[in-house]
Amino acid sequence: MHRNNLIRCPWCLTSPHMQAYHDNEWGAPVKDDLKLFEFLVLDAFQAGLSWSTILKKRQAFHHAFDGFNPEKIARYDEGKIHSLLMDSGIIRNRLKIRGTVQNAQSFLRIQEQTGSFSDYIWQFTGGRTVQNQWESQSDIPATSIESDRMSRELKRNGFTFVGSTICYAFMQAAGLVNDHVTNCYRYHELL
């Protein structure tokens, strides 16, 4: 069947870039540390905004934040933070920019302590994708027991902009949970 005729989660039908993100990334399990860090950065910037806004600016974020390289971001000084605040291609929120620097430092500490941020983050779902069975988009929760625990632990380890709702969105994006609705073609592909 041609991909245009497939049933998808309703949230992605608003634009071509949302549909492409849904079809190619959202919910696919991510084990790569750097990709996980990218999702963590983008989800933090999403707080209070739409995911569509973040996706439109994703390339600008990628460029502005040195390809989401945590080692570089962890060393950002006041000059770099000021230049980011002047960059109209990204969300120019001082707290979120400073939070990204803090999160990069915390990310590197976790990597150093555990050897893998992926192993650390996947512990919250027992190392596997939680296969939910939501029939409707309105059934999907904003948080879970796992995201509550992840949020507490990330905060304890120095992360910021990691409330339970942000953590749950991160878990959805990185495939720690499969929150495609059950009639979406991606739900079955990701089982």
Image: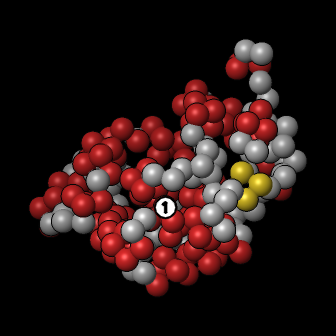
Which residue lies most toward the front here? 115
Secondary structure category for the residue under label 1: helix
Q: Is residue 67 above or below residue 165?
A: above
Looking at the image, residue 86 sits to the left or right of residue 123; the answer is left
Can you give x and y, in whole percent of width and height, for residue 11 in the image?
A: 70, 41
Residue type for callout 1: Ser
Query: Could you tell me if residue 101 is visible in this image?
Result: yes
Which one is nearer the viewer's eye here, 169 or 13? 169
How many discs appear? Answer: 1
Q: Quadrant location of the C terminus? A: top right
Evaluate whether residue 89 shows in this view. no
| Left or right of 139 on screen, residue 80 | left
Image point 71% across, 75% down: which residue?
145
Residue at point 58% right, 30% down?
Answer: 20
Is residue 126 depicted above or below 155 in this figure? above
Residue placed farthest to the right in the image?
135
Q: Nearer the viewer, residue 143 or 176?
A: 176
Measured along the vertical axis of the image, is residue 112 above or below residue 31? below
Q: Which residue is mark 1?
A: 118
**Residue 76 x/y as whole percent:** 19, 63
Mark 1 neighbour density, 10 Å: few (under 14) some (14–19) many (20 or more): many
The residue located at (36%, 38%) in the rendering is 59
Please report the residue visible at 30 percent of the width from the left and 46 percent of the height from the top.
Answer: 67
Q: Is residue 49 left or right of residue 136?
A: left
Q: Can you say which quadrant of the picture contains the N terminus?
A: top right
Q: Using the image as rendered, state which of residue 95 and residue 136 is in the foreground.
A: 136
Residue 44, given in percent of the width and then of the height, sits at 46, 61
Looking at this view, name the residue that lies furthest to the left.
79
Q: Residue furthest top?
A: 2
